[in-house]
């Protein structure tokens, strides 16, 4: 079950992923997603330590919206792991926004609009493109450091124990960009401990547009269901 929407959130219904993104994903906005992959489920579960009731987080990934380019397509920047045939992308990269049109893979989407000025957006784009050009890596090592800190609250404000230079995972990348215009999206937390859920809960004034759709079961949910069925078949209840 998704966590309740915070006050001020605009819940959007009746739209496809494509329609939702075309309507709300403007240059300078931040995108949030969750999906059906095992990685999505693991990241959501790991963030349960941020919730007093230990509920799983809603979001597992963050990206930055660049706006429309000369090809007529919406583009984004993100730090991600992508595996294509004979090609692997690890780190800060540019992708077309239509990547998130796939509703079977991306079951939840939200857009955070901070109402940025054109000079602010240009600064974010310039810094992001610099990180793309210099091949800033996606750090699984730093992600592990963040998972450790989630279990030990006293570590969250300290430097990531597994920090490395020239590396940023998705939410740390977006936070790094906004720090360049003087906006701290997750105050009190070390930059390289920033989680997608903390970007979603940022105290910086903004408008949230959230697409409301019943999520399809993820791979972890399917695995649980299969395991339950197998147990019931092997040890049927006694009447």
Image (tube, rainbow, N blue to C red):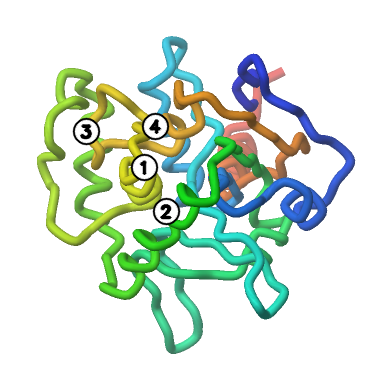
Asked whether, in this view, residue 108 is left or right of residue 150, the answer is: right
Earlier-in-chain disc, 3 versus 4: 4
Kindly report which numbered mark, 2 or 3, lies closer to the viewer in this rendering: 2
Asked whether, in this view, residue 206 is left or right of residue 182, the answer is: right
Q: Are marks 1 and 2 in contact (CB under 8 Å)?
A: yes
Q: Residue at x 15, y 39 (%)?
A: 160
Earlier-in-chain disc, 3 versus 1: 1
From the image, tell me which residue sits under label 1: 181
From the image, tell me which residue sits under label 4: 185
Kindly report which numbered mark, 3 or 4, lies closer to the viewer in this rendering: 4
Give coordinates of residue 153: x percent, y percent.
22, 19
Q: Residue at x 20, y 53 (%)?
A: 141
Residue sitting at the far bottom: 86
Earlier-in-chain disc, 2 versus 3: 2
Give coordinates of residue 105: x percent, y percent.
65, 57
Tag 4's secondary structure? Answer: loop
The label number, if any, that marks residue 190 in the structure image:
3
- Asked if residue 234 shows in the view, the reply is no
Give whichever of 212, 227 is nearer the camera.
212
């Amino acid at each position: 079950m998704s966590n309740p929407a915070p006050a001020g959130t605009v819940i959007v219904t009746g739209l496809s992923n494509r329609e939702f993104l075309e309507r709300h994903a403007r240059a300078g906005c931040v995108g949030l997603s969750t999906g059906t992959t095992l990685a999505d489920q693991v990241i959501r579960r790991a963030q349960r330590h941020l919730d007093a009731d230990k509920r799983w987080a809603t979001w597992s990934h963050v990206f930055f919206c660049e706006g429309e380019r000369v090809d007529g397509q919406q583009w984004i920047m993100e730090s991600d792991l992508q595996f294509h045939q004979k090609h692997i992308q690890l780190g800060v990269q540019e992708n077309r926004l239509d990547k998130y049109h796939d509703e079977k893979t991306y079951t939840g989407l939200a857009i955070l609009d901070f109402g940025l000025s054109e000079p602010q957006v240009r600064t974010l784009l310039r810094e992001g493109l610099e990180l793309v050009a210099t091949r800033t890596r996606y750090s699984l090592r730093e992600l592990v450091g963040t998972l450790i800190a989630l279990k030990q609250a006293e570590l969250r404000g300290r430097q990531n124990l597994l920090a490395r230079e020239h590396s940023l995972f998705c939410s740390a990348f977006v936070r790094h960009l906004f720090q360049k215009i003087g906006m701290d999206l997750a105050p009190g937390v070390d930059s390289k401990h920033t989680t997608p859920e903390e970007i979603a809960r940022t105290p910086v004034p903004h408008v949230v547009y959230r697409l409301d759709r019943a999520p399809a079961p993820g791979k972890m949910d399917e695995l649980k269901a299969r395991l339950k069925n197998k147990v019931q078949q092997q040890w049927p209840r006694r009447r």
